[in-house]
């Protein structure tokens, strides 16, 4: 783990336990925890433990890890009871679309009718 990155990145600090989070799932290389400001009844963030700035960088840098993030997304959705009702997965990529934490993360949103909404 790069200590400079850990010091500077909020989600790296969650990975090493420096900042507490409500963890709902964990694999060797991924972590899922509840968003601190939930926008839906289920709002979980799924991240690679290794630092990548966004999903595009992750996909190019380690496609297998990107797949593991998606597998954890599916596991979380099932554990939250969303596999029947449906759920939304969002990767904000770039400050201009609202990315505020530059460590790749999937938002898993569900538990409310989002039909017709883009976000
Ligand atoms: P972004 O806008 O970068 O796609 O999403 C960042 C998300 O991280 C936001 O939904 C925000 O509420 C969440 N967040 C910011 N700080 C913390 C924190 O300290 N803990 C947790 N669990 N979530 C956070
Ligand atoms: Zn990071």
Image: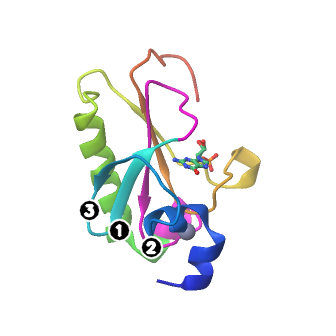
Give above or below for 40 relative to 13. Answer: above
Do the CB atoms of the residues marked 3 and 1 lie less than 8 Å apart?
no
Point out the tag, 3 or 1, that comes first from the N-terminus. 3
Residue located beneath label 1 in the image: 65
Q: Find the magenta span and give its range.
A: 36-58
Give above or below for 119 relative to 3. Answer: above
Residue located beneath label 2 in the image: 50
Give above or below for 97 relative to 69. Answer: above
Residue located beneath label 3 in the image: 27
Residue 104 at x, y = what percent? 53, 60
Q: Is residue 53 magenta?
A: yes
Give residue 80's quadrant in the image. top left
Q: Nearer the viewer, mark 3 or mark 1?
A: 3
Taking the spot 41% from the left edge, 46% from the top edge, the residue there is 22
- CA distance for labels 3 and 1: 11 Å
Point out the tag, 2 or 1, that comes first from the N-terminus. 2
Do the CB atoms of the residues marked 3 and 2 lie less than 8 Å apart?
no
Q: Is residue 55 magenta?
A: yes
What secondary structure is found at the residue carrying circle 3? loop
Do the CB atoms of the residues marked 2 and 1 lie less than 8 Å apart?
yes
Q: Nearer the viewer, mark 2 or mark 1?
A: 2
Q: Residues within 10 Å of mark 3 (few under 14, many from 20)?
A: few
Q: Residues within 10 Å of mark 1 (few under 14, many from 20)?
A: some
- Work out whether residue 32 or residue 52 is closer to the camera in this orientation and state it: 32
Taking the spot 40% from the left edge, 74% from the top edge, the residue there is 62
């Amino acid at each position: 783990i790069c200590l400079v990155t850990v010091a500077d990145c909020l989600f790296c600090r969650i990975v090493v336990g420096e900042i507490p989070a409500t963890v709902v799932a964990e694999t060797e290389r991924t972590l899922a925890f509840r968003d601190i400001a939930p926008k839906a009844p289920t709002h979980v963030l799924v991240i690679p433990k290794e630092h990548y700035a966004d999903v595009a960088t992750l996909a190019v840098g380690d496609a297998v890890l990107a797949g593991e993030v998606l597998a954890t997304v599916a596991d979380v959705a099932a554990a939250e009871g969303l596999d029947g009702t449906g759920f939304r997965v969002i990767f904000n990529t770039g400050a201009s679309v609202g990315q505020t934490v530059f460590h790749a993360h999937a938002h898993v949103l569900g538990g409310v009718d989002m039909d017709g909404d883009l976000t």
